[in-house]
Image: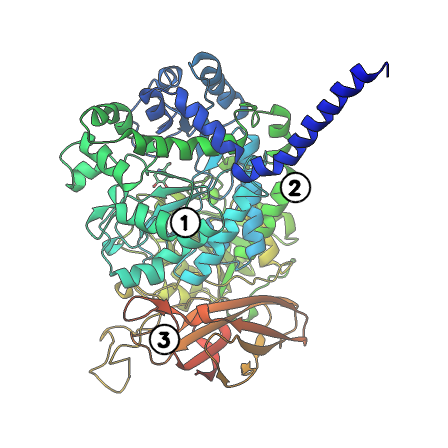
Amino acid sequence: MRHIKFIVPALVLLLVLSAFVWQRPKQIQYNPDPIEKRVDSLLALMTLEEKIGQMTLYTTDWGSTGPTIREGYTEDIRKGRCGALFNSHTVQFTRELQRIAVEETRLKIPLMFGYDVIHGYKTIFPIPLGEAASWDMEAIEKSARIAAAEAAAAGLHWTFAPMVDVSRDPRWGRVMEGAGEDTWLGCRIAEARVRGFQGKGIGNTDAVLACVKHFAAYGAPIGGREYNTVDMSERYFREYYLPPYAAAVKAGAATVMTSFNDYDGVPASGNRYLLTDILRKELGFRGFVVTDYTSMNEMVTHGVVVNEKEAGELSLHAGVDMDMQGAIYQRFLGQSVKDGKASVAEIDESVRRILRLKFALGLFENPYKFCDEAREKRVVFSAENRDAARDVARKSVVLLKNDKNALPLAKSANIAVIGPLADNKADLIGNWSGAGDGNACVSLLEGIKKVCLGEVTFTEGCEVEGTTRGGFLRAIENAKKADVIVVAIGEKAMMSGEAAARAEIGLPGVQEEMVKGLAALGKPVVVVLMNGRPLAIPDLDKRATAIVEAWWLGTETGNALADILFGDYNPSGKLPMTFPQSVGQVPIFYNEKNTGRPFDPNSKWTGKYIDMPNAPLYPFGYGLSYTTFEYSDPKPNKTAFKKGEPIRISVTVRNSGKRAGEEVAQLYVRDLVGSVTRPVRELKGFRKIMLNPGEAKTVEFILNDEDLSFYRRDMSFGSEPGDFEIMVGGNSMDTKKVRVTVL
Ligand code: NOJ
């Protein structure tokens, strides 16, 4: 029994340990989220000024994406008056600012760095509208994934993307940043982009926080004019504009940005109905809300508050957690608390939301986690990323016209390359191109020269804008000597994007006139369009032999286009937005209502223009291939369904041409009679399928109750019994249909 003095304490220790082991699950159950505890303990140490600092976001002087109203941000960091910065990137740059935050401030709270990584950080992918034309969710997710990996390797934690604003108005310059006009497609793309940006989870060093923007309804400014008023019914908002934001939130988007516009008379940055009632309570959003650039300040100009202090109070009460570049929270919120106009509880809640994400990013463990030069060098602009960009670029191209099979071109052809965008690099990366370098782009001319074995000449012919016709003659001379003319025309990158609304959406300058001259030669004229929005180009459509919609394809433009032009890649893109014949038809979109007097060519008293057809130039979902596809009639698994029972529709698609190609089979639904009027067709599914010549595949679509649901007369969301038309085809205007009944 000599060892008793050891045995007893050992037994006691064992007991304690087993109690601990036994208690652990209980503790975990009690406090499921250790971050919560850490946030609370940090919050308890913070002064009001430090809390407000966390709610403040400033731009650095690295880049400007709006009016610069502030300098000296390093002093703000030092004083704990600013918790996040944007327009700051690269490991070297962010490391130094982070050092100030974690070494020189009282509480050493790390900074968070944001940037507009919209379609690539340095390896630039097609503009989002272009990517949407791929109808390829894997490709879109991959593009966001690579953008995130590059951004995170360059010191960034947060991107201001995806923009999920539905828009039916091509005058609005920001259509280039979105997924086009359709709600359902917009939802799928919003989810894919969030998944791509946030990767396997926040805190991984190849992921960044997503920021869904611009909440809400920013895509519907009156007249398409940037920053203009938005006015729409609640039904319209909920049905067409809200779902992509909801989808992005459901996919786990960490942050949301407010929009510049007012909604139902209240600017979004002060709109409690939007930011709290809908976003938090209905959609269950748990992250933080940041304003758009100085939009809090602009509420004074909107005329809903008398001064900036009141603007801050309105925003705080509405649910805005972070003030982007407005410096309103920083300057006035302390006073508002003293005046009893803002509560510390509200502020605490906002700070909690922000700190939670800083903890989730892992910045408290290692504030330099995203500052690794070796990773930055390895990941940013890697050959692998460029290959991926080339692939997504090819997938984004839409073949709008191809008379006499002018395309693909023979590699032996002698080609006259003409146009202001053919030898251009700077514009190819498009607007909102992050840290992209135009000089590193492959131009169309370079791409063609790499592949073409015949003679390739080049002349600009004219500028994108302006009226100089001096180059026409040389263009004609070159064209005369060639077998085929390839003309690269369109818009400059800065003609779309923010603050780039256009009232006329034809081709600017004398570009179209130049094509007219070239077409008169009687040779095949292949037009490559580079633009950030649908254009109204009915004359060009008549004159050109072939038209390739190339949007802004990014870093790999020339290579991707050469793949398409010479047939190494068969185009499969489909328009995510309607191309009108004239700006006078705008807003124009495929999912319109029938009205009481739908268009009838034989009756004057029907809904139409007297000077122009109703039909668009190219409808939503449209895009050709170098092969052709035939659709069978869609076949439902039965004709009558109980409410909620899945409706299975199968259709056989056959490649009736001579080349292998991909087709996007699209399914549209029409509810023939509802308690409120319903659109004549709505996209509810699609399948992208690859088919060899002569090959046929049967695809199946499943429609659930939600696919038939809408906001009924009493604003409840659900389906109604009755007859539905199901349409399947290769674009929104060319479909075969079948009718089913829901009992
Ligand atoms: C204003 C734009 O509307 C928004 O989309 C962007 O993220 C911010 N500026 C920051 O650059």
Residue 587 location, quadrant: bottom left
Answer with the quarter of the image where residue 427 lies: top left
**Ligand 1 position by quadrant:** top left
Earlier residue among tags 2 and 1: 1
Q: Position of residue 417 (x, y in %)?
A: 51, 52
Disc 1 and disc 3 in contact, CB within 8 angstroms: no
Question: Residue 3's x, y, as percent?
Answer: 84, 16
- Where disc 2 sits, the SS reads helix
The kind of residue tagged 2 is Glu
- Image quadrant where one finds the N terminus: top right
Residue placed under numbered mark 3 in the picture: 680
- Marks 2/1 in contact by CB < 8 Å: the verdict is no
Q: As rendered, which of 49 and 665 lies closer to the eye?
A: 49
SS of the residue under disc 3: loop
Q: Residue at the spot x=28%, y=84% of the render?
A: 601
**Are the two marked residues, 3 and 2, in contact with CB atoms closer than 8 angstroms?**
no
Distance (Cα) linking label 1 and label 3 = 32 Å
Across the whole image, how many numbered discs are drawn on residues? 3
Q: Which residue is mark 1?
A: 284
Q: Nearer the viewer, mark 1 or mark 3?
A: 1
Give the labeled residue for mark 2: 384
Asked if residue 187 is positioned above or below residue 691 in the image, the reply reads above
- Pick the residue in front: 559 or 723: 723
The crowding category of the residue bearing disc 3, from other C-alpha atoms within 10 Å (few below 14, some 14 to 19, many at least 20), is: some
Point out which mark residue 615 bears: none
